[in-house]
Image (tube, rainbow, N blue to C red):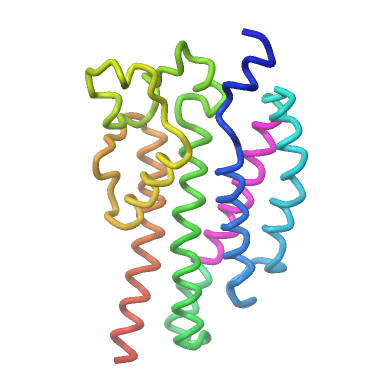
Amino acid sequence: MTKSQETKEMEPMWPSLVALLAAGGLYAALPQSLALGPRWMLIALVLFTLAPSEFLHSRGHHKFCRPIGFFVISAVTLGMIVSVVLLVRAIPAHVVDPEQLLHSATALWLSNILVFAVWYWRLDAGGPHQRSLRDQHTHSHGAFLFPQMTIAHSNQDKWAPLFVDYLFLAFNTSTALSPTDVPVLSRWAKALMMVQSAISLAVVGLLAARAVNIL
């Protein structure tokens, strides 16, 4: 396979970049009391690495894209977790007004979905680049058993998950606190999903408790 063929068949990065930009934007919308450092910091980091990542990706320099991607998603994850901790501490202290509390909890709940969707997309079966190199794009060595992988039908022979599949998985994990129709096969994936579910449960549970207190 030539570099040009590889680049042509490579899964596009823009959905994951949009997700990171959205997570950075949601972080910027939080009150300063729930942010670690300047609120614009994360979205600035994503924007700063956006052009280099896309350039390296288009040129086929995937070994450089991977560490950049992990650095950015790690920074966004750290910021989100710190904000969740600050939110948990702020609720009993009544330092955030109810309307701001609702907006902040919603922003963090949505960020939780976006952040973990990117993690699953980056880690599953070696990441998007490794998945694209498999014969006929057959996805059979991943951490998640997607329904399409269990259907014995010729139309599914070349099926491989895209970012939207991982976004759907992350959404289900945050809403149902389980992967629903996608069995989890790898221990690292189980650990990540436990963290995501715990964050979602903390945000929703504490918000509900605060709402009951207000009522």
Nearer-the-camera pick, 127 or 89: 127
Considering only vertical position in the picture, is 215 above or below 192?
below
**Residue 108 at x, y = what percent?**
49, 65
Position of the C terminus, as image quadrant, is bottom left
Q: Which quadrant of the figure has residue 136?
A: top left
Residue at 31% across / 34% down in the picture?
184
Residue at 69% across / 51% down in the picture?
46
Nearer-the-camera pick, 101 or 159: 159
Q: Is residue 161 left or right of residue 132?
A: left
Residue at 56% across / 43% down in the picture?
16
Magenta stretch contains residue 173: no
**Residue 44 at x, y = what percent?**
74, 57
Position of the N terminus, as image quadrant, is top right
Q: Is residue 82 left or right of residue 113?
A: right
Work out which residue is located at the far bottom of the displayed protein and give it: 215
Query: Disc count in the image?
Result: 0
Q: What's the magenta bit mostly, secondary-structure-wise?
A: helix
Considering only vertical position in the picture, is 63 above or below 167?
above
**Residue 131 at x, y = what percent?**
49, 22
Work out which residue is located at the far top of the displayed protein and give it: 1
Magenta stretch contains residue 78: yes
**Residue 73 at x, y = what percent?**
60, 46
Nearer-the-camera pick, 190 or 6: 6
Query: Magenta stretch?
Result: 65-84
Residue at 60% across / 37% down in the picture?
13
